[in-house]
Amino acid sequence: MNCAYPAAPEGYLNLSNTLAKSKLAAPTRERIALVVAQIKGYDYCLSAHHYLGKNLAKLDEAENAANPNGASNHPGTDTAGRFATEVARERRHVEDLSA
């Protein structure tokens, strides 16, 4: 693989491995990944996380379809999707989403 930033793949894998050890459940991590991939226009990542959401995190088709838009059919995870949407879009300032 010829990459303009040779450390980027290694950095991504390190970040992924670190996040995998976090307290966030796999379905929540995939929901967030779907949101970020959609907002940033990363079609390859969107496709990969749609697959992982369905096959690894066991998200149903309706949930997998809603997540790239920052929505969720599960009340507790809707906040995570909205927060990820704000962070991916704004990158500097996130409003209080508890309202």
Image: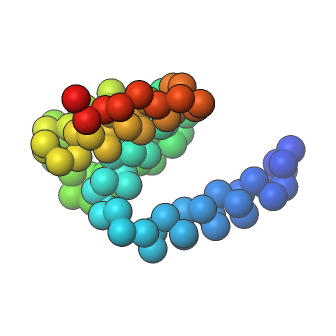
Residue 41 visible (yes or no): no
Front residue (pair 99, 15)? 99
Where is 70 relative to 17, above or below?
A: above
Q: Is residue 63 left or right of residue 16?
A: left
Q: Is residue 4 left or right of residue 30?
A: right
Q: Position of residue 52 (x, y in %)?
A: 36, 55
At x 39%, y 45%, the residue is 32
Front residue (pair 77, 93)? 93
Q: Position of residue 69 (x, y in %)?
A: 33, 27
Q: Position of residue 85 (x, y in %)?
A: 41, 31
Outermost residue, bottom direction? Answer: 21
Residue 98 visible (yes or no): yes
At x 32%, y 39%, the residue is 81
Placement of the C terminus among the 4 image quadrants: top left
Where is 20 relative to 32, above or below?
A: below
Placement of the N terminus among the 4 image quadrants: bottom right
